[in-house]
Image (spheres, helix red, strand yellow):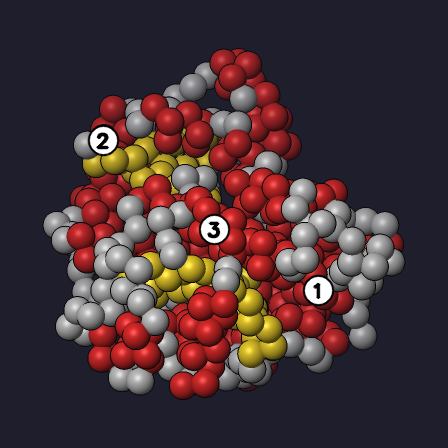
Amino acid sequence: MSREQLLAATFVELADTIGDDFEVLDFLQNLATRCTEILGATAVGVILADQRGTLQLVASTTHTSQVLELVAIAISEGPCLDAWRSGAPVVNVGSEEAALRWPRFTREARSLGFASAQVVPMRMRSDVLGALNLLYHEPTVLGPDDVAVAQALAGVATIGLLQERTPRQKEILAEQLQTALALRVVVEQAKGVVAERTGLSVEDSFDRLAVLARRQGRPLSDVATDVLAGLVEVLALDEERN
Amino acid sequence: MTPAAEILISLMDEVRSELSLPELLCRDACRRLPISAAGIALMNRDGVIELVVGSDERATELEDLQLTLGEGPCVDSFATGRLVLHADLSAPGSDRWPAYTPAALQKGVRGLFSYPLRIGGIRLGVLDLYRDQPGLLDDADLSLALHYADAAVMLVLYLQTGDHDGTGGEPDALAIGRLEVEFEGHPEVHQATGMVSVQAGVGLTEALLLLRARAFADGRSVAETARGVVDRVIVFY
C-alpha cells in the first residue's frame, strides 16, 4: 500500500467511532500503530487527559518498561506536556534546546537510543484531549507535509472521540475513557500472566495478546480480560507456533 | 501529591473520631460534592460483600438494599467494572432495576452514580454516590468524584496491610504517600502482579499483596520489587 492509500484507509478507520461497542482502547492502539507506519516513528504513544485532568498513557506501540517510564517523564516534564498545555505541535526541537527545556526527558530518551521526539496535540477547537507522541531512533526533522499529516491523524482521531455527541453520549464517552484507562491496567496484568505462562518477555507477551485478539477479531482488552479470568489457554498458542 | 492522596491525608486529621476511615471518606465526599449520601461496598474476590459503610444511616441502608435485592447500580458497576451514571430514578429506563428503583425512590434518592473500585482486573468494590435531586454531575464534580474513587482504592490498599506493618493499623500519612508513589506511572507493578499470580497460583488480589509484602520485607519499593519480578530476578514459588 502506498502512503496515500494507507493514509486514506486510516482516516476511514478513525472516523468509525459511533456505536455502543466502540472500544476507545483499541481505537487509540490502532492510531498509534498507523502512526509508526505512516510517519516512520520507532515508537508511538497516545496520551490522554483523564477525567481527573492528569495525562495518562493510553496506547503505545512499545511496551518495554524503560520506554513506558520515558513516556511518564514526558508527561511530567517534556514535549508531551508542552503540546498538551499549549495546544500546539512541539516538533523539530533541536537537541541543544531540548536538553535545556527538558533536561531529564532528553537524558533518558538519549540513554534509550532515541534521537528525536515529535509531538502533536489531540485537539479540536478549544478541546485538547491529549497528545500524540512520536519517538525516533534516528535524528528526524519532520517536513511541513509530515507535520500536517501528523496533525491530521491526531485531529481526526480527536473528532472521532468527540463528534456529534449528545450530552448523553458525552457521558458515555467519559465512561469509555475511564474504562479504557482501567483496561490499560488489565492489559498490563495480562501481559504478566502471559509472560509467566510462556516464558516470553513482557514486551513479546503484548504481541502475543495482540495476535490473539486479531485472530479472534475481538478487542485487545476483551482478550486480556479473558486471560486474567483463565479463559484463554495461552500455552496452547505457544505450542501452536512450534 | 495527587488529589486522591490529599483527600486521604486530610481524613487522617479526623481519625480521633469514632468513625472509621471509609466512613470519614464518605462524609467528606458529601461535603465537597453536590450529593446527599455516599456509601462504599467492599467485596472479596468472589464478589461477596465484606464491608458496607455509609456517610449516614440512610446511605448504609441504601447499600444494604442493593445487597439484599441483588440488583442496583452498585451491583452492575461491580460486575462490569464500569461507571454507572444514572441521572433520574423516576425517568424512563430506570426499570433496569425493577426491585431496587422503587425502594431507592422511597428513600428519597433520584440520581445515583456508582464508581468501580478496581486496579485493572482486581475488583475491590464500589463507591456509590446518591443525590436527592435528579441530574448528572457536571464535569468538575465528575472529576472530583473520580478522585474520591481513587482515594477509596488507596484506602483499601492501605487497610489491607494495616496489620502487617506492626503499627496496629494507626493511620499513617507516610504510608499513603508511599502507596501513591508506587502505583502512579509504574506499569511493571501490574505486569509483576500478573506474573506473581501465576507463580504463586493465587488470584491477582493476593498476588499484589504478596508483591507488596515482599517489598516491605526487603525494604524496597513495590516498583523496585516489581522490576525484579519482570526481570525474573525475584520469583514467588
On screen, residue A179 versus residue A75, left or right, reads left
Q: Say left or right for B95 vs A199.
A: left
A181 or B136, which is in the foreground? B136
Q: Position of residue A179 (x, y in %)?
A: 39, 60
Tell me the kind of residue under disc 1.
Gln
- Spatial CA distance of label 3 from label 2 is 31 Å
What residue is at 46 percent from the left and 47 percent from the top?
B31
Q: Is residue A2 left or right of residue B59?
A: left
Q: Nearer the viewer, mark 2 or mark 1?
A: 1
Residue at (43, 19) in percent of width and height: A93
Mark 2 lies on residue: A126
Which residue matches tag 1?
A: B160
Query: Can residue A67 be seen at all in this image of the molecule?
Result: no
Residue at 37% in and 27% down: A85
Q: Are marks 2 and 1 on the same chain?
A: no
Residue at 23 percent across and 31 percent down: it is A126
Q: Where residue B100 sits: x, y (%)?
A: 33, 80
Mark nearer the viewer, 3 or 2: 3
Of badges 1 and 3, nearer the viewer stands 3
* A234, above or below A128, in the image: below
